Amino acid sequence: MNIRKQSKIFFLLVLSLVLESCVMDIMPAGYCVKNCTNDTLFVDLTDSDTLTDNFYWGVHPDDTVGVFQKDTTSVYIRGKKVILYKFHCVLPDSTSWGFYPLPKETCYIYIVKKQVITRYTFDEICEKKLYDRKIVTKKSFHDNVFEYRP
């Protein structure tokens, strides 16, 4: 192969890498929730007007597939092992993972403190309303981030 062909191939390779990285940089990271509190929170962003059990693995019989130690943490609530999904866990003064998609203009953010989620069953959390619910729109997210303040 002559030098001219090699130069063209190298140029095209570099150009494709540059263009690919530019496309990756401009894509949004999803809708996120920034925890502006001193508590560790479990966050769910959904279009459901009721709290769902997305925080938990093993609530439904089919949820036993796909439980990985890196993605989950185990706690015991009244002697029963509960597996919590780390995706929803947001440490103080940090930002959640990106939530996809938000199909409706209006959605709901559900916030449950770690102390609550590790002491009460999901049914008790719902029954006693031990969560905070915020109604938000897509406009509530500045640069795809909603800052949660109680």
Image (cartoon, rainbow, N blue to C red):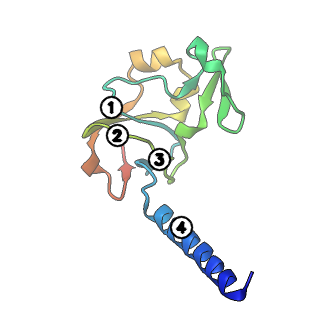
Whole-angstrom CA distance, mark 1 to mark 4, is 32 Å
Q: Mark 3 points at which residue?
A: 98
Q: Name the residue under label 2.
A: 102
Whole-angstrom CA distance, mark 3 to mark 2, is 11 Å
Which of 125 and 51 lies nearest the eye of the viewer? 51
Q: How many labels does the image show?
A: 4
Locate the N terminus and report the quarter of the image it occupies.
Answer: bottom right
Q: In the rendered image, is residue 134 in sight?
A: no
Whole-angstrom CA distance, mark 1 to mark 2, is 7 Å
In the rendered structure, which amino acid carries the disc numbered 3?
Answer: Gly
Q: Is residue 61 above or below residue 141?
A: above
Q: Earlier in the sequence, mark 1 or mark 2?
A: 1
Q: Do the residues labelled 1 and 2 touch (CB within 8 Å)?
A: yes
Q: Which of marks 1 and 4 is nearer the N terminus?
A: 4
Q: Are marks 1 and 3 in contact (CB under 8 Å)?
A: no
Q: Left or right of 125: which side holds 137?
A: left
Which residue lies at the image location 47% right of the left edge and 14% below the top edge? 123
Which of 86 and 20 lies nearest the eye of the viewer? 20
Q: Is mark 2 on a helix, strand or loop?
A: loop
The image position of residue 120, as x and y in percent, is 53, 20
Q: Is residue 27 above or below residue 137?
A: below
Q: Name the residue under label 1.
A: 47
Q: Left or right of 23: which side holds 72?
A: right
Q: What element carries label 3?
A: loop
- Name the image quarter holding residue 127: top left
Q: Which of marks 4 and 3 is nearer the N terminus?
A: 4
